[in-house]
Amino acid sequence: MFNKNFLVALILLSVSVTAKAQIPEQPQERSKESCTSIMVGKQASKDGSVITSHTCDSWYRTWMNMVAAKDWKDNDSVTIYDGRMHTQSASDSTKVYAKGKIPQVKHTFRFLDTAYPCLNEKQLGIGETTISGRDTLQNKKGMFMIEELARIALERCSTAREAIKLMGELVKKYGYGDSGECLTIADKKEVWIFEIFGEGPSKIGGVWAAVRIPDDEIAVSANICRISKLTKSNDCMYSDNVFDVAKKMKLWDGKEEFSFWKVYSGGNYFGEKKNYSDREYFIMNALAPSKIVSDTVMELPLSVKPDKKVGVEDVMSLLGSYYEGTERNLSGRHKIPNPKRKDKDGNLVENEPDSIVSPFSNPWMRPDEINMYYSMGDSTMKNIRTVSVPWCAYSTVIQLRSWLPDEVGGVAWIALDNPGQSPRFPIFCGNTDIPEMLKTCGQHAQRDDVALWHYRKANRLATVRWGNFRKVMEPAQKYFVEKGMRELPMVEKMFNDLQQQDPKKAQDMLNGYVSDFFAATIVKWDDMARLFWRQTWTGF
C-alpha cells in the first residue's frame, strides 16, 4: 500500500524546490555560526561559583572520555593531532594525523576529553566559540589547533592564568594553525576570555589577548571577537607581538587607538554596524536589562554587572533559549483559529482570543521549511539563529567552587543534542570513569548503544507538535535540573564522609551517582520518544 506520509513529504519537498526556483529566496539571517559561551564571576553567581559554558553547535564528535592522570619519564613526548573532532571514539584514528610532537611533562592531570576538552581534576574549566577573523592571518602549518591547545592546558595547568601563559608559550614556539578562536577559561577563583589568531602565512606563531572578567560581572562570547582595549594590568595579558604584527600586516597604523577586535577580526560583525551577535545582546540584556538597553549601538561592553545574582540553572536556561517572548521567536508566528472560542452549542465564549499559536509551530524550523512558508506569502519568516539549535553536538555548563574539595567542587553539567530540549547530567572533577554509552559518537549513524540518539529521537519528534509536546518535555528538563541542584549537597557530604573512611568507596560512589543520574535521563527520554511517536501518528 502506498505510504501517504511519504506522499506528503514528497509534496512538501516539491513545493519548497519549486518556490526556490520561482521567487527570490527569503532574506537570510546567519544560521551557521557555531557555539555560545556564558561566563559568570564568583561574586555575580548565586552561590559563589565561577561559571563558564559552551554549546558545541556543529557536526562535531559527541563521544567523551575521562583521561586518567599519569606520570611520565624524562624523555617522553606528546603528539599533537588534527582531525579528532570527527572521530567515532577515543581509539578511532580515521582521518587523524599528527602535526608534531612536544616534550612531555612529568605529570599530567585527569581531564574530561570532549570535542573541545573542557574540565580537569583541578577545577580548571574551558568553554569555546569560533571567532574566525581575517583569512590572511591563518597559517595551517602551525602545529596547534584550538582543541589541542585546550587539551594540553588541561593536562598541565591548575589555574586560568597558568593555562593562558602556557598556551601563549606553545603558540609562540610551535605555531597556531587554526582560524580565530575564543576560549572562556575559568578556575575556582576567576574567569577569563582568551582570543587568538594566527600570525599570517609567512610566520609560524600567533597573536592573542586575554582579559579577566571582573568577579561581580558576567560576559558572553558568541562567535565574535570581543576584546577591545589592551591594558598593562594584572587583569589583561597579551602576546608580545600583538602590536608589531598589526603594523607588519598593515592592519593598524600605530596612530589610531588600538582595538584588538577591530584589528584582528576584520572590523564589524559580518558587515553590520555593530560588533556583537544577537545572541550576545539577548543574553546580556536578559541578565542585565538595566544596563543593556539598546541593540543599535556599535559595541557592547565586554562584561557587565547583572541586575541580580546568576545561578547555574540560569545559564542552563539561557543556553536553551530561542527568544521566546520576543518578536524573534519563530514558534509564535503561526496562528490558527482558537477552538475554545465557541462552546459546544456554537456560542462565542467571552475572554477567549480569536486565534492561538499552532501546536505545529516550533522555534527550530529548518531553512527549507522556512522557505516553504515564505514562498506561500509569509514574509515574516526568516532564518533566525537562536541560542539553542538542533544541530548542537553537546553543551556544557561548568560550575567551579573553591570551598569544596576539587573532586566534587568542579562539575560539568552536560547535555547532548539541542540544549533547548535535552536534559543535563553531571560529570565531576573527581569522576574516573563515565557511562559506556557516552564513549561512542552518535553523529555517524543511528545507534541504540550511543547516548546521543536516545535524546535525539524524542527531541526531533517533539518539534512535530512543539506546542503540545513541550508541555511534557520542559517539565522533564526542569525535573533533572532541580534533581541535580537538590542532590548536590548530598553528593558532596557523602563523598567527604567516605573519603575519610575509604577513598576507594568515595570514588565508586561518585562514579555510580553519575551513572545512575545519566541512566535516569535516558529512560525518561526513551519514554517520551515512544509517547511522541504514538501521539504523532494516532492522535490524542
Image (spheres, rainbow, N blue to C red):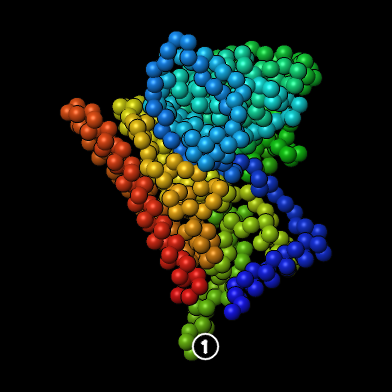
In the depicted structure, whether residue 246 falls above or below residue 186: above
Outermost residue, top side? 74
Residue at x 67%, y 30% (from the top left corner): 179
Crowding at dot 1, Cα within 10 Å, few <14 / some 14-19 / many 20+, comes out as: few
Q: Is residue 5 visible?
A: yes
Residue at x 54%, y 61% (from the top left corner): 463
Q: Quadrant of residue 204?
A: top right
For the N terminus, which image quadrant? bottom right
Q: Quadrant of residue 402?
A: top left
Residue at x 80%, y 19% (from the top left corner): 250
Mark 1, secondary structure of its residue:
loop
The residue pinned by badge 1 equals 346
Say what amino acid the circle numbered 1 marks: Gly
Q: Position of residue 537 (x, y in %)?
A: 50, 73
Query: Of residues 141 and 154, which is closer to you in this image?
Result: 141
Q: Is residue 44 visible?
A: no
Would residue 222 appear left or right of 471 to someone viewing this image?
Answer: right
Q: Position of residue 370 (x, y in %)?
A: 67, 60
Query: Of residues 198 and 526, which is closer to you in this image?
Result: 526
Outermost residue, bottom side? 345
Would residue 149 appear left or right of 44 to someone viewing this image?
Answer: right
Would residue 433 appear left or right of 493 to someone viewing this image?
Answer: right
